[in-house]
Image (cartoon, rainbow, N blue to C red):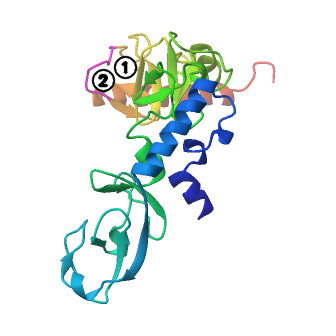
Amino acid sequence: RARALLQQLPPQDCDERYCPDLSEEERRQLRAFSAQRRREALGQGLTRPVPAPCHGCPCRKCGRRLNKGDPGVSASGLGDQFWHPSCFSCHSCHQPLVDLIYFQRDGRIYCGRHHAELWRPRCASCDQLIFVEECVEAEGQRWHPEHFCCLECDEPLRGQRYVMRSGRPCCRHCFDSLFAEPCQACGDPIGADSEEATHQGLHWHARASCFCCSLCRKPLRGQPLTCHHGQLFCSETCSLGWDSSSTASDSSDSAFASAPSPHS
């Protein structure tokens, strides 16, 4: 429960003590932002029986009626409106806010995290709101410029090429050395600068010399294909031909292994 509360109401959104690296100007903006939210948007949802004057009133969220004596949630600052307890949740993440503080905008209720994000972007690295004028935008997320770094070596990546790994940026060198998949054909890593082809969870360089029929060597990019035991084929004919040649090769090896030595 404590972890959920920290997720819904991040302390760094309203208390500069949780943001030791902020500049004085950023601290000033955070204090002003927090004070304005408390003054204009903060409230608390309280559970209580629906009073007689509100008998038959619709739930503010789902529209179903609430009868006198039913458990309902009223929101301070939003007038004589009621919600079903299960309906009193954040408009963005749908986490319950019954008996908790909430923030409102345009009649909708939000947890602290998602209300703050209506006004300020949040850094995907440090999870703090961004008060500087510039930020890095990539893959639908935002970062403080100094926090957009490789997840492994911390090399700054602003203006550099990168690869996303589990939602975090990775420099090309670290990706190639730590995360690149081996090519099923040649065995070399498929680096960040290489085009990749995948099929049934296996990986190849997309070049014609690797992503091709294992028997006739026909390039398979954009072509129909079949896969047997990790080998690619352009047709069932080539697949059967490969099986036949493999069987013949196995038989030859077996005969060679069982042949008597001329010196025995």
Q: Quadrant of the N terminus?
A: bottom right
Residue 232 location (% of width, % of height): 39, 26
Q: Amino acid at mark 1?
A: Cys
Q: Is residue 71 magenta?
A: no
Total numbered labels placed on residues in the image = 2
Kindly identify the residue that appears in the image at 53 percent across and 13 percent down: 158
Q: Residues within 10 Å of mark 1 (few under 14, many from 20)?
A: many
Q: Are marks 2 and 1 in contact (CB under 8 Å)?
A: yes
- Image mark for residue 234: 2
Looking at the image, tell me whether mark 2 or mark 1 is earlier in sequence order: 1
Kindly identify the residue that appears in the image at 66 percent across and 25 percent down: 152
| Secondary structure mostly seen in the magenta stretch | loop
- Towards the viewer: 152 or 197: 152
Residue 27 location (% of width, % of height): 60, 31
Q: Is residue 64 left or right of residue 36?
A: left
Q: Quadrant of the C terminus?
A: top right
Among the 4 quarters of the image, the one containing residue 144: top right
Q: Is residue 264 left or right of residue 239?
A: right
Kindly identify the residue that appears in the image at 32 percent across and 19 percent down: 220
- In the picture of the structure, the residue carrying the numbered disc 1 is 213
Residue 235 location (% of width, % of height): 28, 27
Residue range corresponding to the magenta coloring: 218-225
Q: Give the Cα separation between the discs numbered 2 and 1.
A: 5 Å
Q: Secondary structure at mark 1?
A: loop
Q: Is residue 74 above or below residue 71?
A: above
Q: Amino acid at mark 2?
A: Cys
Q: Is residue 250 above or below residue 60?
A: above
Among the 4 quarters of the image, the one containing residue 53: bottom left
Kindly identify the residue that appears in the image at 60 percent across and 42 percent down: 12
- Towards the viewer: 194 or 2: 2
